[in-house]
Amino acid sequence: MDRSMEVAPVSLDIISHSVAQTQRLGARLGELLSGGELILLDGELGTGKTVFTQGIAQGLGIPDIVNSPTFTILKEYRGGRLPLYHFDLYRIDDPNEVLTLGFEDYFYGQGVCVVEWAHKAEGIWPAEHLRIRLKVISDTKRGLVFQAYGTIYTQMLKMLQRTAYAH
């Protein structure tokens, strides 16, 4: 493919002023999901990746308490509109470990995959996905930069932008 024809990802930059707002933003995204989505999260410790994922779970109607699967790598949540597969790659050293463990099947399934520390497995992700980079701005503020790769994710991001500040 001619590289000059490639389209840059569509981006959305949002500042969250509280944990509750980060969670609400995740919930708004969760409400837009229809199954088969891959959400890649990156950011240092304490930037709100798990808080954002808790919001996604709320938006999917999952009643369980969502916490980080750091030691198990994957936690599955059911009971909502769609299953949520919550990955935490913090302890992964080699991207191929994700494939060796058989997790690739989840990325092409009907549930929603949310992957914390996604950069640790760079190169294995499907071309179409939503990447969210979180960063600390202050004790309570977080910056979230959304990048949509692919038509479905671009449309989703446009819808999120329209509803992100609605109450």
Image: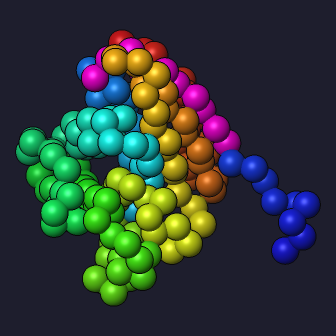
**Which residue appears at 28% of the width and 65% of the height?**
91
Magenta-colored span? 10-19
Q: Residue at x 63, y 56 (%)?
A: 150
Q: Is residue 132 left or right of residue 10?
A: left
The part of the image, by quadrant, that contains residue 92 is bottom left
Q: Is residue 125 visible?
A: no
Please name whichever residue, 41 or 35, is drawn nearer the observer in this view of the structure.
41
Find residue 18 and report its horizontal and vertical position in percent. Answer: 32, 17
Identify the main secondary structure in magenta: strand
Q: Quadrant of residue 99?
A: bottom left
Question: Residue 125 vs residue 24: left or right?
Answer: right
Looking at the image, is 165 positioned above or below residue 81? above
Residue 167 position (above or below residue 38): above
In magenta segment, residue 147: no
Instruction: Give the residue drawn at x 46%, y 22%.
Output: 137
Q: Quadrant of residue 46?
A: top left
Display coloring: rainbow
User: Residue 141, image x and y in percent?
Assistant: 40, 19
Looking at the rendered image, the quarter that the C terminus falls into is top left
Specify whether residue 130 is in view: yes
Count of numbered circles on the image: 0
